[in-house]
Amino acid sequence: MPAIELSNVTKRYGDVTAVRDLDLTVSEGEVFGFLGPNGAGKSTTINMLLDFVRPTSGTVRVLGHDAQRESVTVRQRTGVLPEGFDVYNRLTGRKHIEFALRSKDVDVDPDEMLARVGLSDAADRKAGGYSKGMRQRLALGMALVGDPDLLILDEPSSGLDPAGAKEMRDIVRREADRGATVFFSSHVLGQVESVCDRVGIMREGELIAEDSIESLREAAGGDETLVLTVDSASQDDLDAVRALDGVSAATTDGGTVTVSCDSGAKTKVIAALEDQGVTVNDFETQSASLEDLFLSYTEDEERTEVSA
Amino acid sequence: MSWQAIAQKDFEDAVRSRWMLGLTAFFVLLIAAAAYFVRPGPGQTFSSNQLLGLVSGTLVTTLIPLIALVMAYSAIVGERDSGSLKLLLSLPHSRADVVFGKVAGRSLALAVPIVVGFVLPALLLALGPLQFDALSYIGYTLLTVFLGVVFVAIAVGFSAAMASQRLAVAGAIALYFLFVPLWGAVRFPLQIYLVMGGGPGWLPVAGQDLFTAFQLLNPNAAFKIISGAFLNGELFTGQSLQLQLAAVGMLLVWLTVPPLLGFLRFEASDL
């Protein structure tokens, strides 16, 4: 049984079509990244999974239940971090968690949930005084109550600092290891590629790609860029690098070497340089950004449309 | 039970609002002031029913609807505007749970200033030469809470139906003016026309009956009929029995129909 199943779903607001003919299936236990620029229809899709909005046509099933008629059953087994939410300013963090526990009829120590999302110290402070990141973590704590079968996270890392974003990724991974299905939207590639089994890309209300991130990058032709800080490198050294499989370009200004390559070729590049007697002091990788990925997709689409 | 979780959350949230503190203080002060003005002279005794008679026609029927509307108009639409409704509906609650849980939570929250407002002055009066009729005092307090609950239900129904906070504010103000000052202003000329003048001759209904029906429509006026009978010791007895029953019926209609209509609108809308 798929965890999420959208068939032929369209959502129109007046003249505006937010989502068009969307078919999407997410299997149980999968971590699915739902990508796209703002306004692409990601949040509308998520809102339809939760019965916040109703599709104009098509069917939405979540955890084997009709997302409209059996929404309460769906949400009983789902943890949600909504987008654009607010907390109850006058209630403490603990009160929020207690409310979630009562709502889901779960008997767990609220302090344990607060500790899981790193809010133990702020438990008795009113949530109105929380920072954006703390509010985000509080909502995540409420979402994790009752160990849900499905986690739906809408832009989970927005407002989080890098450490918070990493924590969020760790939590996603932990929940996935437990067996939960995770469905999350993002416009930041870095979060998606490290935790997702599969991604889908939305553009202007349509799903334009659906695949593993590696195949997507291959299809988009997006190499990774490896930037190495070295003592000194000559053109001969670079030739050795260029001769490697998976390397498409290599340049140097003497002190740094910039190599475009498949992600699998990175260690070979470093080894080849060291074989040439070059000392590699430091290196970093820059992935093809989602923006580039989008661009290559949209350009491809347009090209196909023109040639067709 | 899902609506109970919402009611409890909502009560805890509402009693922490500054509005709530202010309204409670205001209400206590006004009742205390009324008690001070009707206090007995030296050597005289004084019945608590006199105090109730004084506040009933004035304070209670003008202030309780106001406090109830202020407390409840944003119950749902406010959460919709701020986005906390998304947090609420991420949890396994139906939209019916939200509407009826909110009515219950805000009603409980409103009961606090009413009970405190009546109890504190009573304690002060009890020190003096007061002939304290506890039963009618408690009964009247409960009736007042009931009036408040009816207005909370109206406001929550409104709050569920509206898509923006501004509409809900306008609606609450309009409702208050309709039920309190406007009704009061229209009531007297209408009474002269219908009761003294007999009303329009082409209608098969007597003017007096039309006027009674008009009065019953307003939850405030229906409350006055019941509370008046209660303070006179004639609750559900005597000549006005039918009128009282009609008034109770009307209050129950106001208690249930607005939340129901609000729910239907809320249930059908995209958030």
Image (cartoon, helix red, strand yellow):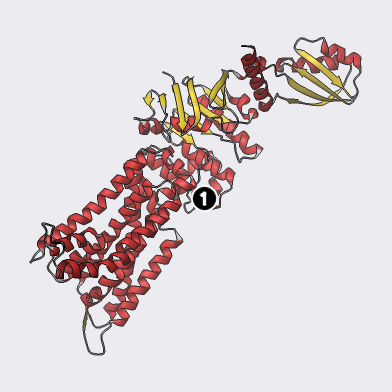
> A108 above or below B144?
above
Q: In which quarter of the image is the N terminus of chain B?
A: top left
Number of numbered discs on residues: 1
> Which residue ends up furthest to the bottom in the rendered image?
B42
Across and down, in percent, residue B190 comes to 22, 67
Q: Residues within 10 Å of mark 1 (few under 14, many from 20)?
A: many
Whether residue B112 can be seen here? no
Q: Position of residue A142 (x, y in %)?
A: 47, 40
A106 or A10: nearer the viewer: A10
Q: In which quarter of the image is the C terminus of chain B?
A: top left
Which quadrant of the view contains residue B21?
bottom left
Residue A294's place in the image compared with A91, above or below, is above
Name the amino acid type tagged 1: Ala
Nearest the viewer among B5 and B52 is: B52
Residue appearing at x 72%, y 18% in the figure: A223
Where residue B90 sits: x, y (%)?
43, 37
Q: Circle 1 — which element?
A: helix
> Above or below — where is A64 with respect to B52?
above
List the residue tagged with mark 1: A127
Can residue B91 be seen from the camera position used here? yes
Which residue is located at x 30 percent, y 62 percent?
B179
Does A271 sit left or right of A9 as displayed?
right
